[in-house]
Structures are given as structure tokens and as C-alpha cells.
Amino acid sequence: MKKDFYEVLGVSKDSSIDTIKSAYRKLALQFHPDRNPDNKEAEDKFKEATEAYEVLSDTTKRQRYDQFGFQGVNSGFGAQSNASYDDIFSSFGDVFGDFFGGGGGRNRRSSKPVGEPGSDIKIRLLLTLEEIATGVEKTIKVKKQVPCTACTGSGAKTGSGYATCNTCKGQGEIRQVSRSVFGQFVNITSCPTCNGSGKTIKDRCQECSGEGRNSEETNTKFSVPAGVMNGNYIHLRSQGNAGKRGGDPGDIIVIIEEKEHKYFIREENDVVFDLTISFIDATLGTEVEVPTLDTPALLKIEAGTQPGTILQMKDKGIPNLNSYGKGDQLIRVNIFVPTNLTSKEKSTLKELQHSKHFVPEQKENTKGKKDFFDKVKEALF
């Protein structure tokens, strides 16, 4: 089970950015791969700490994490899985440079032999309000790049292997020295021939032409939590396009879209339903069956219910994302006025037309009309 980000860094939820940064520096120095070569556990802890830091050091990401938990950051705001260690440390100034020997003292070669990271895939997923209300398991077909089976993703012909890059002589970087009146400057860039790995393929795999990947349609299964909203997105880590020649895979980003409902309008976690009843039922009162996001339910209409009245059905709305509680179903009452009446029906109504009980009371004029949501507030509060 994934650890809480605050627990990973060993800080409290009200910690300042400086405290979070300091805690991350200690962990990064302790578990950095350069200090722990071939130690998978240390590498995992380093990545775990980096992911936690990338979220908690960013005000927006931190607020989403505090409000929605992992789903908040999985909707597109987690750690940068393809960021190099050099990129991560660059924001800390000389602290890591001093520890690892400063400037160009570190070996910049990637842990992958000659790999390039794969790209992300964005997919739009249309959901009904019923699916959003309960959460749902989805399986989607995705056409993407997958590791080549012939060379197991390496890009090298079986038995071929790799050779030292002739361009950078195995260093993975190119250095260019320039002089000016201010002194000597050294510009260090990743080697374009080997992509910073220091190695090149001897003989390319014929099945994938040395790319280490082929195109294939795959099924991807994942869970959508209850309470998601239009525009939320789910990050499926490492399920995107495979990287070239063993590079890290990209992600799949599933963007949530809500399907328009036949009956309901969503307002945050509440759902609104327009109910039309006859003026007789509104006058005398009745019980009617109304649809909900679950099963139909009986709703009591009190005698004398006025048009525009807002009735509330508790906990019949959308669940709160990653927290307790649900929204409500709000019933907006409309009155049906018949137009095709028989002579007998018209006669009966005419008898009642001048009854004091059927003559509306004239109220004092008010400036402007209350809109629907003003009435909702009155009903709720």
C-alpha cells in the first residue's frame, strides 16, 4: 500500500516548504543511487521521497493532495517519472553538487543502457452519472508501443549487445570549453549519439529495426473512484508507450467526461430533478415515485405545495471524492396546467374560480425574482 507523502518525508501536515525541502534533502542524500549502487531498495526509497517532495513542495499539488489524497495527484499531478536525477537536484543549488564532487564530477549516464523514455497517451472516458455515483471498473483498448518480444526491448540483435559510444567515448556527455574576458566556461550536454548512456547498439534487431518496441493494441483495466467530476483525470503510471531500447515507459492519462443525463442535472455533488405534478396533486398532496441514481423512491408532496418549491432527498446525490458523505437529490416542483378540458371539467373549474380558496393572495412587489439557486439555499438552510 502506498505511504502517505507526509509520512514518507517524516514531516507534519502543517510543515513549511523549508521544512519539507530539508527533510527531502536528507533522504535524497541517504538513498541516492550514486551512493547506493545496485541497491534496488534504496533506489525505490529515493523515488518515493522524490515523488512526495514534488507534490508537497508545490502549493497547488499539495492542496489537491490534502483535499483528495492520492487520487488528487493521480489526476495528473504526481512526480515526474521521467525526470532525471540531475534535473531533480538542479533546484537545490550546490548542496548535492558538493556531496557528489561538484559540477561535472557526477556520472551523467542513465541507468538504462541506451533507452529513451516513452511518451504519454491521453484518453477521454465518457461516464454516466450512475457510474460516477458508484465508481466503476473500466477496460479500454489502447493502441500503443510495447517492448519488442524478439529483443526483449533492448533494440539489439540477440547475442549482439552494446559497444562504447565513439562520440563521447563512453562518458555520455559532450563538453565544450569556451573562453571570454570573464574566464573559462564549460558547457556540458548529453551525447546526441547515445542519448547520454555512453553505449550504442552493435547490431540492430530486425523485428523492431533497433527501436526495441513495436505497435500493438492492448487492453488496459483500471478503477474509477466514485465522485469524480468532468475534467478530472486519472494517471495510469508506466502504462503508456514503451520507451525506445529499454527506456522507461510513459503513462496513460484518462480524462473524465460526464455524459448528459436524461433526468438529472449535476450541481457539484447534488443532482437536480424537475418534477411536474398536476395542480390538484399540489393542492391536495400526494405521493409520487421519482427516479434516483440508484432505485426509484417515493416522495411525499405536502398539500398546498407551490410551484418552484425545492424538496430535498438526503444522501441521494454523488459521493464526495475520497471522503465520507454524499450530496443530495433536489426536487424542483413544477405545476402542470391542462389545456384540453371537457365541457364538464370547465364547468367544475368555473364553479371554483371565484372561491376564496382559489383566489391567489396579492403579495407586496419585490425587486427582482429569486432564481432557482436562491430557493435551493432557502430549502437547505
Image: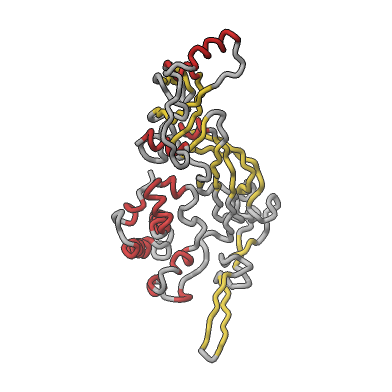
Residue nearest the viewer, comparing 120 with 271: 271
Q: Is 49 on the left-hand or right-hand side of 75?
A: left
Residue nearest the viewer, comparing 68 with 371: 371
Residue 50's spot in the image, x, y percent?
Answer: 41, 58
Q: Is 40 on the left-hand or right-hand side of 142?
A: left
**Which of the colour schemes (rainbow, by chain, secondary structure, one colour) is used?**
secondary structure
Residue 236's spot in the image, x, y percent?
Answer: 51, 46
Q: At 39% across and 30% down in the image, what residue appears?
A: 315
Q: Give the vertical position of 347 relative to 29 (above or below).
A: above
* Quadrant for the N terminus in the image: top left
Residue nearest the viewer, comparing 338 with 166: 338
How many numbered badges does the structure rendering display?
A: 0
Where residue 201 sits, quadrant-wise, is bottom right
Task: Tell me if I can see residue 30 in this picture.
Answer: no
Residue 158's spot in the image, x, y percent?
Answer: 64, 52
Residue 81's spot in the image, x, y percent?
Answer: 49, 55
Q: At 47% across and 39% down in the image, what residue appears?
A: 369
Q: At 49% across and 62% down in the image, what residue appears?
A: 84
* Quadrant for the C terminus in the image: top left
Residue sitting at the far bottom: 181
Residue nearest the viewer, comparing 242 with 73: 73
Q: Give the vertical position of 157 relative to 126 (above or below).
A: below
Q: Give the vertical position of 297 relative to 325 (above or below).
A: above
Task: Tell me if I can see residue 190 in this picture.
Answer: yes
Where residue 170 sits, quadrant-wise, is bottom right
Q: Is 39 on the left-hand or right-hand side of 341?
A: left
Q: Is 333 on the left-hand or right-hand side of 29?
A: right
Residue sitting at the far top: 344
